[in-house]
Amino acid sequence: MIVVQHLWSHWTKASRAAAAGRPRLPDAAPLPEPWDEGAGRCWLHDLRRLEREGFETRETAGWSTPDDWAHAEPMHPANIVWRESPDGGVALSATRPWGSMLRTAWPAVLPSPLLSVGPERVARIIWNGRFMSSAGGSDGSYFYAEHTVLAVSTARPRPELFTAATDIRTVDLRTRIY
């Protein structure tokens, strides 16, 4: 089965410099239990801290597909797609987040898949960005986002799957957002 963890946060200029008001998410978090074996192909663990929610940590977990994930939460761009790789591992692809709203650097072309790892190896994509708050840019304000997506194909999901991982392959797409 594939296990995906999405750690993400959003904020605006109002809290940009307030480090105490904008707590950072960990690099990885323990996975919640239990897993209902056989209920689906991918277990998705989503952990977020958003300014509009007072930076309260919110957590959800359950079976998902990339398409379900893209439609479940309008505040995240769902720009990462996961699938099983031919060797039984996991392959991750990434697309440009929020198209014309992005105001920071993003590669013109990314290979697909962007990252592929074998079974029991962890794949991680990290990215951030500054975005116009409206699609047309009519209000002139920005919001900022940080995302970390971890994925692994495993026969044994366990709470420490990502927190104790030592075999991690990373693609870092972070850029200067201020």
Image (cartoon, rainbow, N blue to C red):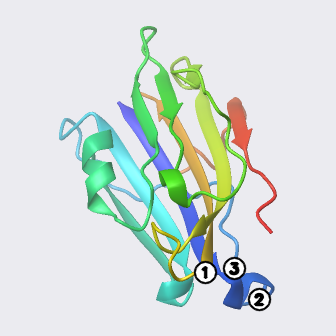
Q: Which mark is residue 141?
A: 1
Q: Circle 3 sits on which residue?
A: 23
Q: Nearer the viewer, mark 3 or mark 1?
A: 1
- For the residues labelled 3 and 2, the Cα–Cα distance comes to 6 Å
Residue 150 drawn above or below residue 76: above
Q: Quadrant of residue 102?
A: bottom right
Q: Is residue 12 left or right of residue 174?
A: left
Q: Where does the image place residue 120, in percent across and percent down from the top left?
A: 54, 25
Identity of the amino acid at label 1? Answer: Ser
What residue is rendered at 56% in x and 63% in y?
8
Residue nearer the viewer, 95 or 155:
95
Instruction: Please give the count of numbered marks on the rendered protein.
Output: 3
The answer to whether residue 153 shows anywhere in this view is yes
Residue nearer the viewer, 95 or 57:
95
Q: Is residue 21 left or right of residue 51?
A: right
Identity of the amino acid at label 3? Answer: Pro
Residue 23 drawn above or below residue 100: below
Q: Circle 2 sits on which residue?
A: 20
Q: Where does the image place residue 4, in percent across and percent down from the top left?
A: 45, 43
What residue is rendered at 53% in x and 78% in y?
50
- For the residues labelled 2 and 1, the Cα–Cα distance comes to 22 Å
| Label 3 SS | loop
- For the residues labelled 3 and 1, the Cα–Cα distance comes to 22 Å
Q: Is residue 176 left or right of residue 53?
A: right
| Label 2 SS | loop
Q: Quadrant of residue 124?
A: top right
Q: Where does the image place residue 92, in percent across and percent down from the top left?
A: 50, 30
